[in-house]
Image (cartoon, rainbow, N blue to C red):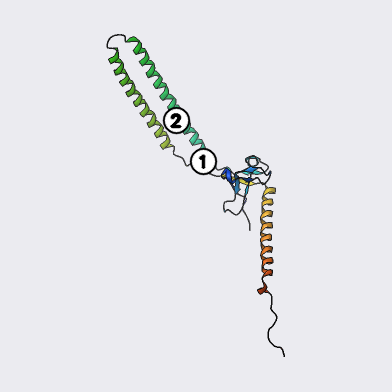
């Protein structure tokens, strides 16, 4: 009946929220053992409390999170570069429009609009290619689905063990009590004639 002191933090639907084991406020966070032997509902504030439980830091998870943050920064830089290029192109177009004041103005504007849209499309394709290259190079496992793992402090872990042990004792005594109610377990009176 030994239970390992490793607990995974899971979230359930808000409709399935139950009272916290410590403060009895409704919560949707559950700490559960890896082998599903035991679980209990707990508030996020209690999980963050070092006096209640300690997180088990997974180095691979930390490395994956840092890599994802770096990738997000690179994507933001690429987007900013694209916006700057776009602003420069628009700035050149507005200056060119002010200088053109002759009769061929409409034709020139149409040509410039085509050039501008072609340059915008080219810049857009470059941006998409850079973002795609960054995401392909840095494809990481989904961090959101990696469970948070904790160990309970000694006192709270012992409380869980005691509660589990008490429940097991109650279940066994209930089985014994139900077995005593069964009349076939007791010997019956002999039905033979003794004389």
Residue at 36%, 12% in the rendered image? 95
* Percent of width and height locating residue 179: 67, 68
In the rendered structure, the answer to whether residue 71 lies left or right of residue 97 reads right
Going from N to C along the chain, the mark reached first, 2 or 1, is: 2
Residue 7 vertical placement versus 172 (above, below)? above
Which residue: 46% across, 28% down?
Answer: 76
Number of residues whose C-alpha sits closer than 10 Å to that of mark 1, classed few (under 14), some (14–19) or many (20 or more):
few
Image position of 187 (left or right of 125)? right
Q: Is residue 68 left or right of residue 27?
A: left
Q: Secondary structure at mark 2?
A: helix
Position of the N terminus, as image quadrant, is: bottom right
Residue at the spot 68% in from the left edge and 69% down from the top edge: 181
What is the distance, in whole Å, between disc 2 and disc 1 at their CAs?
19 Å
**Residue hosting label 1:** 144
Residue 9 x, y percent position in the rendering: 58, 45
Q: Position of residue 141 (x, y in %)?
A: 47, 42
Q: Secondary structure at mark 1?
A: helix
Q: Residue 99, relative to residue 120: is it above or below? A: above
- Quadrant location of residue 52? top right
Q: Which residue is mark 2?
A: 75
Q: Nearer the viewer, residue 125 or 59?
A: 125
Percent position of residue 110, x then y: 30, 18
Query: Where, quadrant-wise, is the C terminus in this rendering?
Result: bottom right
């Amino acid at each position: 009946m030994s239970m390992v002191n490793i607990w995974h933090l899971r979230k359930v639907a808000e409709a399935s929220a139950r009272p916290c084991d410590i403060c009895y406020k409704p919560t949707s966070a559950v700490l559960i053992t890896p082998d599903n032997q035991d679980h209990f509902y707990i508030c996020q504030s209690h999980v963050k409390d070092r006096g209640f439980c300690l997180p088990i830091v997974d180095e691979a998870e930390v490395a994956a999170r840092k890599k994802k943050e770096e990738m997000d920064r690179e994507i933001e830089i690429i987007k900013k570069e694209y916006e700057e290029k776009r602003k420069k192109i628009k700035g050149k177009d507005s200056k060119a429009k002010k200088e053109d004041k002759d009769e061929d103005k409409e034709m020139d504007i149409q040509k410039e609009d085509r050039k501008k849209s072609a340059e915008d499309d080219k810049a857009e394709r470059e941006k998409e290619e850079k973002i795609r290259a960054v995401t392909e190079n840095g494809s990481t496992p989904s961090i959101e689905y990696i469970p948070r793992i904790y160990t309970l402090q000694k006192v709270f872990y012992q409380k869980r063990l005691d509660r589990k042990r008490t429940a097991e004792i109650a279940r066994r005594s209930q089985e014994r009590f139900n077995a005593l109610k069964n009349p076939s377990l007791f010997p019956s009176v002999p039905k033979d004639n003794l004389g």
